[in-house]
Image (cartoon, rainbow, N blue to C red):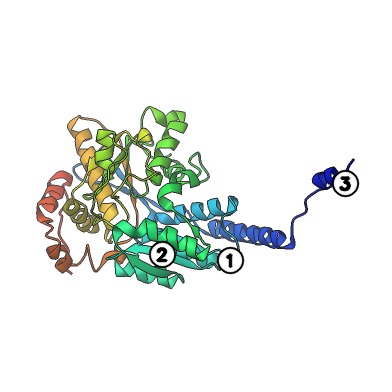
Amino acid sequence: MSAALAGRDAPVTRTEKDNRVRAWVRWAMEQIMADFNRSADTHLIKVLLPAFPDIPLYLKDESTHPSGSLKHRLARSLFLYGLCNGRIGPETTIIESSSGSTAVSEAYFAKLLGLRFIAVVPIGTAPEKLNQIRFFGGTIEETAFYNVYQRAESLADELDGHYMDQFTYAERATDWRGNNNIADSLFSQMAREAHAVPDWVVMSAGTGGTSATLGRYVRYRPELVERTRICVVDPENSVFYDSFTSGNERLEIDASSRIEGIGRPQVEASFLPEVIDRMLKVPDAASIATIHWLESVLGRKCGGSTGTNVYGALTLMAEMRQEGREGSVATLICDGGERYLSSYYDPAWIEAEELELQPYLDELEAVTGTRAQQCTT
């Protein structure tokens, strides 16, 4: 054997640096798994409305996660994805483009792992969310809504960091077949209900990752695939609905959604229309009126995307009632309303946005048989 060939076949040993990185990755995985083990599952709330005695509404309350929203699940998945793909190490700066909730949750996990975190957010993001990002040790860079992707990418290049890119990786970072994902948890909690297999699961789209997980899981489970349908609700100033109905995946608009966390000016890579059965367009005034109505039902405030979800769910429940069908409908409380006291719960903000809530409050009262009242403080 020649010396050259022997050298080529000689075993390659990991460097001391490689060993340190692998040791850190092991530690990081243990921290995330321990955090998961400490966390209880979120509650499933059954809402019985007078006008729907045979169609209960179920609300999966994702606001009770340690970082306060549904995005806690996504952030954990994105960190695991980055770690397992070798993109996050002990000195990696984490960067994300986010209107708030995903950034809050990623800041939580970055702090857990001792990593620097930078959130690139659209100008006008709710100050309550910005304060939560800072609370978990993150820093913030505000930019125009149409520039958040580019600025996050350029920061990652400048700092040799990792751009989490939730809008691309949300659907692939989540284990949609189980592992206590949102779908697995929801359907497990409904197992003892009279209508254990919901007719509809309703979800708004930001990245599209949650609706992709729900749609895939339903098709994966034989007992669900013929019964449960997925409906995605879309706010104003978003292209998902128009893309879904037209089949055009390249649609773009020069506007941003007023309902933070959902709606996008372009079709995101994580949005999978093939696993969605139906979409509804929900006016912003209807979304915000619904969270004011919902406060009188639940005794608590919820975020704007929850209003979009619940308005869509009530629309489908009304259709089922008109058709004489019994069954159940499930949707999500995405986050708490305390993050939006200066916007959705502020009469001055509502007036400045020229949103007429009263017609939708009247509609909600008529449809559900419960009194709806707009909060004035």
Q: Above or below — where is 49 with respect to 226?
A: below
Query: What residue is pinned by disc 1?
Result: 91
Discs 2/3, front: 3
Q: How far apart are the two marked residues, 2 and 3, measured between alpha carbons? A: 53 Å
| Residue 191, image x, y percentages | 43, 39
Q: Which residue is mark 2?
A: 119
Q: Quadrant of residue 224?
A: top left
- Label 1 residue SS: loop
Circle 2: element type? strand
227 or 328, nearer to the observer = 227
Q: Quadrant of the N terminus?
A: top right
Q: Could you say whether the residue bearing mark 3 is in a helix, strand or loop?
A: helix
- Residue 268 % position (x, y): 36, 46
Say which of 81 and 36 sits in front: 81
Tag in front: 3 or 1: 3
Which residue in the protein does label 3 denote? 3
Q: Tag 1: residue type?
A: Glu
Q: CA distance from mark 3 to mark 1?
A: 39 Å
> Please, what is the three-letter code of the amino acid marked with disc 3?
Ala
**Residue type, mark 2 in image:** Ala
Residue 54, picture quadrant: top left
Q: Earlier in the sequence, mark 2 or mark 3?
A: 3
Give the mark, 1 or 2, whose residue is nearer the N terminus: 1
